[in-house]
Amino acid sequence: MKSFSRISSLLFVALCILPASFLQAQAADIAATPPMGWNSWNHFHNKVDDATIRAQAEAMVSSGMRDAGYTYINIDDTWEGERDSSGVIHTNDKFPDMKALADFVHSKGLKIGIYSSPGPKTCAKYEGSYGHELQDAQTYAAWGIDYLKYDLCGMRDQMKAAGSPEEAHKMMVDAYIKMRDALRSTGRPIVYSLCQYGNDAVWEWGASVGGNLWRTTGDINDHYARMEEIGFGQAGLARFAAPGHWNDPDMLEVGNGGMSSDEYRMHMSLWAILAAPLLAGNDLSTMTPETVGLLTNKEVIAIDQDRAGRQGDRVSAVGPIEIWARSLADGSKAVGIFNRHPGPLSATVDFKQLGFNRTVKARDLWLQKDLGKLDPTYTAKIPGHGVLLLRVSQ
Ligand code: GLA
């Protein structure tokens, strides 16, 4: 009798634990490493349509980006049309047939993403999912959608009307849970991207509402000052990221023309150390070879996509020189030596401070060149707004 009750209580505990670990495993299955792809917003804003999406999918393949790991073609805001009398959402004139578009993107060996809001309206004032969450999730699944960016925007007005900040917070959390459950009920694996600009320390609860990634900041733009502010502002968030759920410092601006090559190298290097989603935000159909090189450097991407999924963090900041490091699955470390000053500066890195105890082996990842053995204290000249990105091992 005693052993029976022991077995039944063990069974009870197992049944309680199972759903949590099962859900974690499910999250890790669809975003085991930070999602990589492209999103329409940064370059096209509301001027995105079916033809644009097809051209981006084709360019993702022909440029070599797909083979470098980029997978998702994500349609951001402004695809939405009206709801019909049964409440089913339809596309607007720019997207005549979403299912056919999804089939086309899938035929290129890619996946497709879409955008909505938990509020009645999106940021660009198109139709949101409020009150139609399950219906919308079912529509997305029927179209063959693989990724949803769910942008708080229109819900902020409702939150303002809440009686207290706690109540407003609960409204937001409940809205994210509602769409999580709706997506899960479709049975289709759909990456769930939370976008609420990092409010209420989303990194602390984003995974618990099913987020595979959550924006940690307001919007990026194609200016060095904004990229720098966002990128270096990520210090301290590393422990909240893990396979299945990632901090998202917003999409890439590489190739949009507002920054120098060194600045774009800094952008990519920081995002890789941060285990950030790599969602290109430029026009893939008109890229220069230099932009392709910046986006597809395999050794830099390997840092971002390292299977251990441990986000890196700041190690030191001395004036405009910052050293950031990320531990990698094979025991080596990615080390970024960043110069936030506009002119070149000498920077010294103390590898002992990074856990190495004698000479180290280092490889320059942008040049893809071994630097051989380096002394534990190493000095290099870093270009203005530039970076030396190393892979270091003992
Ligand atoms: C917000 C988001 C952006 C983009 C726009 C679309 O500003 O943060 O990334 O999705 O809405 O309207």
Image (spheres, rainbow, N blue to C red):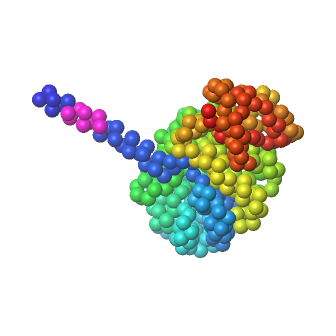
Whole-percent x and y of residue 169? 55, 38
Whole-percent x and y of residue 363? 69, 42
Quadrant for residue 200, please give it. Answer: top right
Whole-percent x and y of residue 361? 66, 36
Quadrant for residue 335, please give it. Answer: top right
Q: Magenta region: which residues?
A: 7-14
Whole-percent x and y of residue 257? 80, 56
Residue found at x 77% / y 51%:
222
User: Given the current orientation, which residue lies at the most extreme left position?
Assistant: 1
Comparing 309 with 146, the one in front is: 309
Residue found at x 76% / y 37%:
338
Quadrant for residue 388, please give it. Answer: top right
Q: In the rendered view, does 384 fall on the left or right side of 77?
A: right
Prevailing secondary structure of the magenta residues: helix
Quadrant of the image for the N terminus? top left
Can residue 352 be found in the magenta stretch?
A: no
Can residue 9 be found in the magenta stretch?
A: yes
